[in-house]
């Protein structure tokens, strides 16, 4: 499906499954701009970022980056990219309200060493009431089952928030405690190409396998909240403080 030509079909599929894949969301030229901005961000901004805004395999040198949250707070290009234009328009269409821009994050599941991401719901991290938010996942690489595509449990967004507990995966601190093998058998792999985009609901259950390939698996995620959603700021701040303490104690930040 393509935005905005298939806007009604996109919304119907998103409502039914909790996620939808949009082919060629960015043109090759626009995608090249994102890649160039990302490279500049890594070269110029990453060395100066606070510890909780860069997660990497080689912490002392900040090499082999796994995740860069809150890029919008440090870079005008990425801040502008999700505050206006087709990304925010799509998010608003899916949410049925104006889309409130919240976060831009880079994800990289490294070749051979990129570990699995446990089953989780993004909404657990957001502390929203009601839990109305959407993540737009822009692929920068060819992504398939070998290099750890996102795997979704269709329709799981309609069952509310699942119980989560602490995981040991850097950048994904929570996992669902009661995820079953029967549910794994119903997962749908979201295989995409550079410039394709996946939109998923904050309550849809998703995970990834480890990256077994020699290829990178890079993406940029854009998070938007509904205007109806209110943040429990005290719960969010408690979680962030506890997580920072735990990661520091484990030597991961």
Image: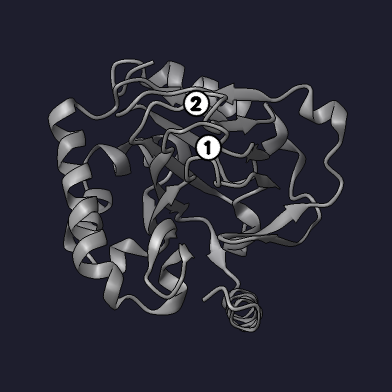
Instruction: Please tell me which residue lies in front, 141 or 237.
Output: 141
Residue 123: x and y in percent read: 61, 54
Which structural element holds mark 1?
strand
Residue underneath mark 1: 200
Q: Are marks 1 and 2 in contact (CB under 8 Å)?
A: yes
Instruction: Please tell me which residue lies in front, 196 or 210.
Output: 210
Instruction: Please tell me which residue lies in front, 140 or 21.
Output: 140
Residue 5 seen from this side? yes
Give me the C-alpha separation between circle 1 and circle 2: 7 Å
**Side of 201 where 250 appears, left or right:** right
Q: Residue 20 shows which numbered tag? A: 2
Please determine whether, in this image, residue 237 is positioned above or below residue 79.
Answer: below
- Asked where in the image residue 7 lies, by quadrant, the reply is top left
Residue lying at 62% horizontally and 31% vertically, measured from the top left: 151
Dot 2, how many residues are within 10 Å of its Cα: few (below 14), some (14-19), or many (20+)? many
Residue 200: x and y in percent read: 52, 37
Dot 1, how many residues are within 10 Å of its Cα: few (below 14), some (14-19), or many (20+)? many
Residue 16 seen from this side? no
Residue 133: x and y in percent read: 52, 49
Residue lying at 45% horizontally and 35% vertically, measured from the top left: 94
Residue lying at 24% horizontally and 55% vertically, measured from the top left: 78
In the rendered structure, which disc, 1 or 2, sits on the residue that comes first in sequence?
Answer: 2
Number of numbered markers: 2
**Side of 234 where 187 appears, left or right:** right
**Side of 237 where 157 appears, left or right:** right
């Amino acid at each position: 499906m393509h935005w905005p030509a298939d806007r009604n079909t996109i919304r119907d599929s998103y409502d039914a499954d909790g996620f939808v894949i949009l082919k060629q969301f960015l043109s090759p030229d626009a995608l090249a701009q994102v890649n160039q901005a990302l490279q500049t961000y890594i070269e110029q901004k990453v060395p100066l970022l606070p510890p909780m805004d860069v997660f990497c395999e080689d912490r002392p040198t900040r090499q082999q980056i796994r995740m860069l949250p809150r890029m919008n707070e440090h870079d005008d290009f990425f801040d502008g990219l999700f505050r206006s234009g087709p990304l925010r328009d799509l998010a608003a269409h899916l949410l049925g309200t104006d889309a409130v821009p919240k976060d831009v994050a880079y994800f990289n599941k490294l070749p051979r060493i990129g570990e699995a991401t446990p089953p989780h719901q993004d909404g657990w991290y957001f502390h929203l009431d009601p839990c109305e938010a959407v993540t737009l996942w822009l692929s920068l690489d060819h992504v398939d089952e070998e290099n750890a595509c996102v795997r979704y449990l269709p329709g799981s967004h309609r069952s509310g928030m699942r119980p989560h507990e602490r995981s040991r995966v850097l950048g994904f601190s929570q996992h669902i405690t009661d995820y079953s093998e029967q549910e794994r058998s119903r997962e749908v792999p979201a295989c995409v190409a550079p410039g394709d985009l996946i939109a998923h609901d904050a309550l849809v259950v998703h995970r990834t396998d480890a990256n077994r390939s020699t290829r990178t698996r890079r993406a940029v995620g854009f998070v938007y909240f509904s205007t109806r959603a209110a943040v429990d700021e005290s719960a969010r701040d408690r979680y962030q403080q506890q997580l920072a303490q735990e990661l520091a104690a484990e030597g991961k930040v």
